[in-house]
Image: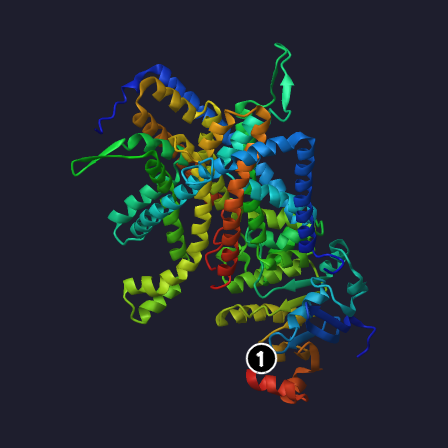
Amino acid sequence: MFGLDYSWLSDPVYQGWLLRGTLNTIGLALASSAVAVLIGTFGALALSLRIAWLDALIELFVELFRNTPPLLQMLFFYFTLSTIGLRVTDPVTGLSVPLLSAFDCALVSLSFFGGALCIEAFRSGLESLPRSVNEAARSLGYSRWGRFRRIEVPIASRICLPALTNILTNLFKTTSQASVITVPELMYYAGQIYNDTFRTAEVMLLVLLIYVSLVSVLSWGMSRIERALAFPGYGKGH
Amino acid sequence: MNRTNALIELDAVTKSFASFEVLKGISLSVKDGEAVCIIGPSGSGKSTILRCINGLIPIDGGRIRVGEIEVHKLRSEKEMRPLRHRVAMVFQQYNLFPHRTALQNIMMAPVQVLGHDRREVEERAHRLLAKVRLSNKADAYPGQLSGGQQQRVAIARALAMEPQVILFDEVTAALDPETVKEVLTAIRELVDEGLTCILVTHEMKFAREVAERVCFTDHGRIVESGPPAQIFDAPQDPRTREFLGQVL
Amino acid sequence: MQWPLTYHEKKRVVQLAIVLALAGWIAADALLGGAAYWQRVWLRLPLLLTGSGSGWPLTGGFALNIFLGLGSMALAAIMGTLLAFGMMAKSRLVRLPCFFVMNFLRNSPWLVLLFAMLYIIPFNVRLFGVSIAVPAFVKAVIGLSLPTAANFAEIIRGAVQSIHSGQWEAARALGYMPMAIYSRIILPQALRRMIPGWMNLYALLMIATSLATVTGIQDVLTTLNTLLSMENERVIVYFYITTLFLFFAYCYPIALLARRMEQSVKGDTL
């Protein structure tokens, strides 16, 4: 009953699919992570200015994306953005086609989802700075911007790193859901392979292993960065 | 006292947090080169007085003057900059920046805020580290230093701004008894050199030795002030007597 | 309200304005022809919520997502507690495998785990000579409970470790035995810190139940897809917004409550 058959793995076609899928997954994860961190940085920066109307809008964005399924967000972007007008006319064929491809939709939706998580994490990182540190900076004559740039951000970014690791691994794992809107990443090719070979359990086990390895490498790398950037001796006493 | 030669002057300063009136009309003047100790029960507004003098907390009423700067008229952080250059502060919790070494902590503000020449500041920082007897810890991070060492770095950091006045806010309250001495020694040397100092402290013995004048505060008012011998040996006000009876 | 407004009052006003603007926009859209679309959504709402056109019995739709979430959470609580105690065991022989399992589950994507369970768990299980069919719903519950259990265990471990070591020393000095220290000193304190974490986890799990559509059960997404195949393109937007709102309306209050509790827990210890 547990005899697993991996003979299909010797087929170069399937090897190619797995490789291409893995590369696409990594590409999607990297791109959406980069945009998410950008969104998070600017969002948290804007929040720290404490402009009431801007904050209300940003918080709405954060709560909307944090409290709805990323899968549904992706489907929403995929199926509705083209119907509500985001279409262009293909210059070659003259047909009206969606402006955003499946990959673009996945990228946009994952970036927004990750960005919402990043804003929240960066905001709480900035808020967790002891008020006394801020007071010391003020008494040394730092301006608002100087304080932000030279003291708050360097310290807060270290405080945020563990949360950022969580978000980035979460985002990496969530890229698998892009297969539902036919983005040709690892999960998508997995489906292709077991449709061909009917070796569902074997394919899923292998894919699961690939994902776990990649995510483990990512979180290991992040913890290395955390350690390299940690302030010597900081936080031991408290 | 002659009012014109006072370096710092507070006149009927009031301050409330929400509905709680912390300062109920504080008047105080400090001459250039004078060391003044503020003592009193906790919650009597001692730390708030210091924070008002260097503008960390805006006041509700009254006037504060440091040199020719009218502190109560300053509105923005930018306008406060000359004041911050003139008045430095050392905190109870040291408040060193954890992401910079001891030397960098001392150099940061003079270079980044005052725009002084980096090489000159570095020389100054090394000199100050030697002064607080921490030359061997220049490259240590705050997290690697003991409380007393951190506090001495904080004093050096305040001195690096080349201030006219230093405010000490219960700087030994968070320290172990054996490290208190090393910090007090460093402060005593500054006072002896003639730097103007205002100290909020619980160390009565130290206050008696180092201060030229002691002010006793209670419930947002300065109840009594005078030379240490008078305050400690012959207090006039019953509240002062009660407080000293408890702590001595 | 007093003039000038404080920051928080201003924010409230803007939030109110956003809600009003949204309502106004929906009303304007309804007047401009959206009303017909909203009517289609309204017609299908019982089906979306309960899986049956009349609104009863609860055979699918969003109700099934809720059942799925509750079932997975219950299973995850049992497995997670065992895993947590395993991770805190004295013996390395117990501790290390538990850590490995926890990390493996936490590092695997929910969707992939769900698929893997779907295909690895056989369709029929032989128990005492009787063949029992395993329904897709059970597979979905198991598939979702695995990563939840790992997170559940990590919340327990984190909360127990956050209790200051002085508490252990004090309890030992008072003559408590190790088990009694856990049950009378550490866990009562840690529990207060675990509850917000568990609530957040439940909200996360609820969001993840949307993935169960891949197992073919009649959850809200499957129902939605079936419905949409019969609707025109334009209506799809309205259906998606409605479904997104269902999840938001369910998960946001939980997350909000969890945050409140986190704040209140923050103050109670050093």
User: What kind of residue is marked 1?
Assistant: Lys
Residue in the image at 38% along x and 31% along y: C215
Depth check: give the residue in front, C150 or A144: C150
Front in this rendered view, residue C107 or B47: C107
Nearest to the observer: residue C170 or residue B144: C170
- Judging by the rendered image, the residue that carries numbered circle 1 is B205
Q: Position of residue C124 (x, y in %)?
A: 25, 32
Q: Quadrant of residue C109?
A: top left
Can the viewer see residue A120? yes
Image quadrant assignment for residue B129: bottom right
Mark 1 secondary-structure assignment:
helix
Q: Is residue C152 above or below residue B84?
A: above
Quadrant of the rendered image containing residue A214: top left
Q: Position of residue A226 (x, y in %)?
A: 47, 44
Task: Classify mark 1: residues with Cα within 10 Å, few (<14), some (14-19) or many (20+).
Answer: few
The residue sitting at the left extreme is: C129
Looking at the image, which residue is at 56% across and 34% down? C41
